[in-house]
Image (spheres, rainbow, N blue to C red):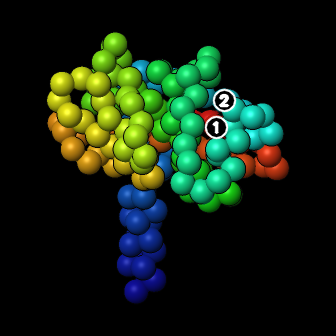
C-alpha cells in the first residue's frame, strides 16, 4: 500500500506544471518588463480610485504599452496594449472605453480589462497579463 501511495504521489508531483511558462503567443514577442509608477504623480491620480484605468505608452519595455486597471486601492491588473491575436502593427494598438479594450483592426476583437478575457472577435488568446503589485505609493509592473 505504501508503494502505491508513493508512486501516485510521485506521478502527481511530476504531472504538476509551472505557471511560469511563457504564454506561447506567436503574435507578441517576449519582452522583459520591469517598470515602476509613482502614484503621487498627477498623471496617475485616477489609479488611486476603484474602476479607473491608465494607458502607459512610455518606454517601459512593453510591445505597444501597458493598460493598468485599478480594481481596488490595493488590487490592480496590468495588460499589454497590443492585441494578442495580431502581430504588432499600426492597427493592433487597442483603444480603451470603460473596461473594454478594442483592437483597431477590422476583426472586432475586444477584451475585458478587468480579467483580460476576450469578449468578441477572432483568435485564441486573451490579453497578455503582466504582474503588478503596490508597495506604498509605487506600482511595480514586471513579467
Residue name at image x 29 percent, y 25 percent: 104
What residue is disc 1 on? Answer: 141
119 vs 130, left or right, is left
> Which residue is most to the top?
90
Q: Is residue 65 above or below residue 112?
A: above
Question: Crowdedness of circle 2 by 10 Å Cα count: few (<14), some, many (20+)?
Answer: some
- Secondary structure under tag 2 reads strand
Q: What residue lies at 26% left-to-right and 48% top-to-bottom? A: 119
Query: Quick one: 143 or 52, which is closer to the camera?
Result: 52
Q: Position of residue 94 (x, y in %)?
A: 38, 29
Q: Is residue 26 visible?
A: no
Numbered label tally: 2
Location of residue 138 (image quadrant): top right
Query: In which quadrant is the N terminus drawn?
Result: bottom left
Q: Is residue 123 left or right of residue 82?
A: left
**Mark-to-mark CA distance, 2 and 1:** 6 Å
Q: Is residue 61 above or below residue 54?
A: above
Identify the residue shown where x is 64% and y is 45%: 47
The residue to which callout 2 is attached is 34
Q: Circle 1 sits in a helix, a strand or a loop, which is it?
A: strand
**Residue 107 point in image, percent of width and height:** 17, 29
For disc 1, the neighbor class at 10 Å (few under 14, some 14 to 19, many from 20) is many
Q: Which percent across, then down, holds residue 12?
A: 40, 66
**Are dots 2 and 1 in contact, CB under 8 Å?**
yes
Residue 139 in view here: yes
Tell me which label, 2 or 1, sits earlier in the chain: 2
At 33% from the left and 14% from the top, the residue drawn is: 89
Amino acid at each position: 500500500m505504501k508503494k502505491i501511495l508513493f508512486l501516485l504521489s510521485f506521478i502527481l508531483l511530476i504531472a504538476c506544471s509551472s505557471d511560469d511558462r511563457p504564454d506561447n503567443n506567436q503574435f507578441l514577442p517576449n519582452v522583459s518588463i520591469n517598470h515602476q509608477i509613482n502614484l503621487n504623480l498627477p498623471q496617475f491620480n485616477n489609479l488611486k480610485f476603484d474602476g479607473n484605468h491608465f494607458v502607459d505608452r512610455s518606454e517601459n519595455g512593453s510591445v505597444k504599452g501597458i493598460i493598468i486597471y485599478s480594481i481596488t486601492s490595493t488590487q490592480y491588473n496590468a495588460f499589454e496594449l497590443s492585441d494578442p491575436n495580431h502581430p504588432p502593427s499600426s492597427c493592433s494598438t487597442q483603444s480603451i472605453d470603460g473596461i473594454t479594450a478594442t483592437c483597431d483592426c477590422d476583426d472586432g476583437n475586444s477584451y475585458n480589462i478587468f480579467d483580460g478575457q476576450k469578449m468578441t472577435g477572432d483568435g485564441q488568446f486573451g490579453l497578455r497579463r503582466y504582474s503588478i503589485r503596490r508597495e506604498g505609493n509605487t506600482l511595480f509592473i514586471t513579467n
